[in-house]
Amino acid sequence: MEIQSLYTLSDEEYVIQRAKNALIMDPIAAKAWMITAKTLYPNNFGVQFEAYRIEKTAGHLREAAKCFSDLIGKFHQHPEFWNEINKVTSALRIDSDLDPERQFLSKMFKHISPEIQHKLLLITADHCEDTMEHCKLLLLLLQKFHSAIPSHAPALIDTLLSAEKHSHASNHPINNYRKILVCELLPLLNEETTTVELSSKLVYKLLHKAIEYYVHSLNFHNNSNGQGIVNAELSWDKLCSVLEFTGRQLGWDPYLTTFGQNWTKEGYWQKLLTFCQSQCMNMDDNNNIRQLLYCLTVFFLQCLHDYKLSLAPEPCPGQPQTSYFLMEAFVDPTYPNPIIEPKSKRRKLDHETSTPQITVDKPELRNIVNNFLMTVKCWELLNSTEALQREYTKLNMHLKLNVWLTQFLIDYSVYKGQLDDALNYIKQKQDQYSPLKRNLRTASIQYLKKNYYASYNHIRSVIETLPTSNNGNLSNCLIIGGTQRHLHFLPLTKLGILQICTKLLIRSILEKAEGGYADLAIGNILVLSQLDWPQEEERLPSLLKHIQQRGAFQYYLFQTYVVNVDILEELTFLWTHQVVLDVVPHLGPRRIGTRGADKGVKEEIRQAIKTQVCRSNDALDQLIISFITKERESILQTLMEILKVIKQYTD
Amino acid sequence: MSVQETKISLRKIEFPACAKEALSRISQLICRRGPSLSQMDLALDLMAEFVFCEIDKRGNKLPPLNPIKELQLLDILFEYFNGNIKEVFKNTVFLSLFSGTTATLRSRILSKLISIAIGVPSKSVLISASALMQQVGDSSMNYNKLAEAIVKDYFVLIPNATQRLSGLPDFPVPRSLLETVVLWVTANSKLCIAAQQNPSPRSLLETVVLWVTANSKLCIAAQQNPSALPSGTIVMESTTSIAGLLKWCILAPIYKQDSELYANLHLGLLNNILDIPQGYQPKAINHVHLAVPIRYIYKYAASLVRKKDEAEKNRCLLEDVNLQLSLDRYAQAVQVALSTNCVYGNVGELLNQLSQLPQNKLWSIVIAANQPNK
């Protein structure tokens, strides 16, 4: 535009237009024009805003920030500028954004002086009609300016609490207000440099809100299959920082509420124990109990969470995820003693016999056991004194932690051998347990209670719901030596489950027979023993001895289920040594008659054995599954006496 | 020790050792509360006879020092001012050595001493030098010579001076240097008008632009950090370099200097003016200094419209791009300076003079906006 034609413009327009004209050809001169315009018309919004817009369009961070700062005090009521303010604050909240304008505004904000930044956020928050926006802006303010915390944090806490109360989400702890409160604001308040005045009642309330939030959100993550595990780790830190904050506010001994870099679970546990011992005299001091209670509860919940996570470890890529399940396994004194870790060697003897051995299949799974034992220790400490128990019950009623504890409590009852408690929990919380786990656990407990019939029925249900995609391997840790009880973290794979079910069934039959084996019982045991061969081989000689003593063995399921070469070889050996094998149904029982008269029979039996040997490569898991599911009658007969007892009970 | 004894004992020592000894005697004489007149006289005598060797023992005038002796003296002075003495004493000695009636005689030594101090650089010598300039002011012809010498040393003889000196914008080295440079520029403006050519080596301009844009508080630094002066001194109002530098960029277009550096310097100066603390007693820019460009613009405008009739005159002035750019820059500078309330003196008189400038829309806006009755 020619200078002459510019003369027709008004003064303001002229100066602005000169700046705009110069922008492309001579940005330096444009800036000089802009400065002049701004000093000429300090109270003219149009000029000031135009100056800002020119700097913004040119991408000058420092200059735009300066113009923005000039505008904010005087003109924030102006809708056009207000819009710009909102753009800045919204850009601040989105950290990684590719939108160039937002990036620019966010960077520009950093060039604004702290006082103006403070003012900007406060003005915006005050003008915000949406509560959530208001809270977010205030939070942003507090994050940027820690000095504003004492004056604005209490109000923000109040706003968040009442907003949560009045929002639709008030019954659900996972909501956005709570998230801001617990994940952002409280850890911020824990910053060393800041002090906030809050009533102790409010501090407890905040701690409750925080615990509740974390318990719920972690539980939620667990259900969605390990999603957000990393987040979970972070959030424990944050919960610990809330605990630190609480401790400082309430004047707790910092001994228990210091969570530094070198924090370890074992170390913290020792601290808790030391605290208990040193404070046991003052346990009627309410403050001490509460301090212990909250620290212990949070620690317990963390251990519990870790335990739950370790039960379903991340699978190797390309492999299905396997979860683990605490089961009562078996002890055989004739087995060699398991290698006991040096640590447990140091334990006292009486302690050793009452504490069950817990095994896992692979050394890298050992952390499940450690996590479990730490959780158990916490739980026992929580229930160690009446005062603590009473306080915990109160807290529990408030926070409804029980929902989350059920699975652990069942594991704990199993660990303690409190079978009835375990059964009760399972009945109460049927919906929280998958049918597979429920049946597996019930089968095990019923076996331990010698209710073999019930145990078998649950085993059948388990077999019906075996996992199909995760085959797994047979374990060799299900039986160990020694005299202690033996628990095992069973991988919930097809073979793992089938193996323990088979063992339960073998033992049911054995225990029921009490040494007086019927042929059917021997036959069933032979069939079931085939799965875990040769681990079950040791049982074979005694069974064969029974057959030999009796001189005959009748088992019509032979042709369907006995395929193990070793067993077939031993049976053939007995057969060639004058033992009658009645294993082919249509031949019927025969005595050894005149020489040569049963030659055809012999031939048939030999043929039958040959046929079975040919099947020795059959898939054993399939064979056992169909045995357990299809041969209900035969199996029940070997558990019959129990059946009678149950009938007597029910009649 | 009597006056005569002192002199006799010093005469037993050869130059330059006697200069060194004399300096310590001088500082003993004048660095005290209220030195007597005789003490002052003795100090001045010692300077003339033993330090600068301007007179012999009978008071006869001697020829200037030969280059070797000059170098020896510089070495002694440099060592003395870098020694472990209180800043206020250093400034006292420095002021007595280089001001007063003998200043012209000694300006050669002074410029070399400062030149060395810039090159080394020596903070203590530069502090004393800036105290001297603050007290004596920029009007004295001696300091124009000094500035000229330093610009010659640093911007004419050294090709990449910008690079060498770019590391300097820290207190106090650039401040003193900048002051000297500006003095030179103000003093030489007549020169540049006569020659109608680039008044300064480009590297000088580059250095100034670099400093001014890098530090928007540089131009008022001298006022913000007053020097330590001997007790009883009447502290002189120090002037900032803003007006002098502004003249430089305002007049550049009409002397056909279209280097971008001038625009940069102009913007840097505007930002410097904006950064002058508000509410601070206005003493940054004197109205007389700010009015200096007016007459140069008149002269230029007069040369444009010579032998033209009235109607053509106006059109000619409006269409002359250089004149208009010069006026725009001038108006911008005055507007910004007035808006930050940093001009002192008779502002009404200044506006009156400015309203006589050739026609320019921005000027009419600025003058209208700053009328006191408005």
Image (spheres, rainbow, N blue to C red):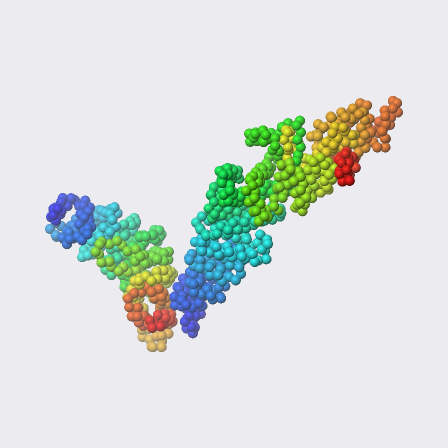
The structure residue drawn at horizontal position 34% and vertical position 53%, both measured from the top left corner, is B169
Q: Is residue A83 left or right of residue B188?
A: right
The structure residue drawn at horizontal position 46% and vertical position 64%, both measured from the top left corner, is A76
The structure residue drawn at horizontal position 84% and vertical position 32%, both measured from the top left corner, is A585
Quadrant for residue A461, please give it.
top right
Q: How many marks?
A: 0
Q: Is residue B212 above or below residue A4?
A: above
In x, y percent, where is residue B47?
A: 17, 51
* Residue B207 seen from this side: yes
Q: Is residue A438 left or right of residue B347?
A: right
Q: Which one is in front, B249 or A622?
A: A622
Q: Is residue A528 left or right of residue B323?
A: right
Q: Is residue A453 above or below residue B125?
A: above
Quadrant for residue A648, please give it.
top right
In x, y percent, where is residue B108?
A: 22, 53
Q: Which one is in front, B156 or B269?
A: B269
The structure residue drawn at horizontal position 74% and vertical position 29%, both measured from the top left corner, is A514
Q: Which one is in front, A582 or A87?
A: A582
Q: Quadrant where the N terminus of chain A lies?
A: bottom left
In x, y percent, where is residue B308?
A: 33, 75
Q: Is residue B60 left or right of residue B186?
A: left
In x, y percent, where is residue A489?
A: 63, 37
Q: Is residue A10 above or below residue B85?
A: below
Q: Quadrant where the C terminus of chain A lies?
A: top right
* Residue B269 seen from this side: no
